[in-house]
Image: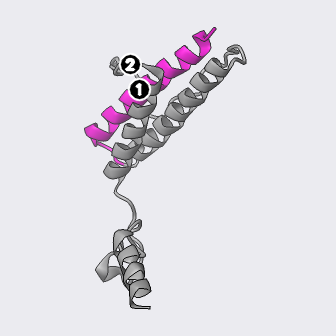
Amino acid sequence: MKRLALVLVAGCLACGGSKNAAAPVAPESGGAVMAPNPHDEITQLSQQIDADRAKLQLAEPVPLPETPRVPMATLPACQPPKTERCTASCTVGDSICKNAEKICKLAQELPGDNWAADHCARANKACEDAHAQCCACR
C-alpha cells in the first residue's frame, strides 16, 4: 500500500502537481485566469510558422516594404493536383496562413508596436511563399 502511495505521489510530481500549470492565475484576481500576453502568443505562433516553413523547405521570409502589416486579404485560389505531396504542401501552407492571420490580428491590438507589426509582415510573407509553393505544386 505504501508503495502504491509513493508511485501516485511520484506521478503527481512528475506531471507538475499543479492543476493550473497551463493557465496562470493572478493572485490578486481572486482566482481568475490571466489573459495571455499578446507578445507570448505572437512568439508561439511565429515558432509554429518557422516549424511549418522548415517542413516546406521555405527560405527565411524577408518582407518587402509593401508587405501587409495587417491580416492579408484572401489569396487567389489555385488548383494544384490532388497528389499526396501537393495536398500535404497545401495543408502546411494553410496552417502558416492561419497563424499569420492570428499574428496580424494580435498586432492590430497593439497599435504602435513595431515588433508585433514586423512579426505580422514576416508571417504574411511566409504565407505568400507557402501559398505560391502550394499553387506551383505539380
Q: Is residue 65 above or below residue 138?
A: below
Q: Give the residue pinned by disc 1.
A: 54
Magenta-drawn stretch contains 72? no
- What residue lies at 27% left-to-right and 39% top-to-bottom? 115
Colour mode? one colour
**Residue 40: assigned label:** none
The stretch in magenta equals 110-138
Determine the residue located farthest toward the bottom in the rendered image. 1
Question: Which quadrant of the figure has residue 112?
Answer: top left
All told, the count of numbered labels is: 2
Front residue (pair 122, 95): 95
Residue type indicated by callout 1: Ala
Front residue (pair 77, 134): 134
Q: Magenta-highlighted stretch: main secondary structure? A: helix
Q: Is residue 45 above or below residue 131?
A: below
Q: Give the residue pinned by disc 2.
A: 66
Tell me if 34 is positioned left or right of 78 in this view. Answer: left
Q: Is residue 124 above or below residue 59?
A: below
Among numbered discs 2 and 1, the one appearing first in the sequence = 1
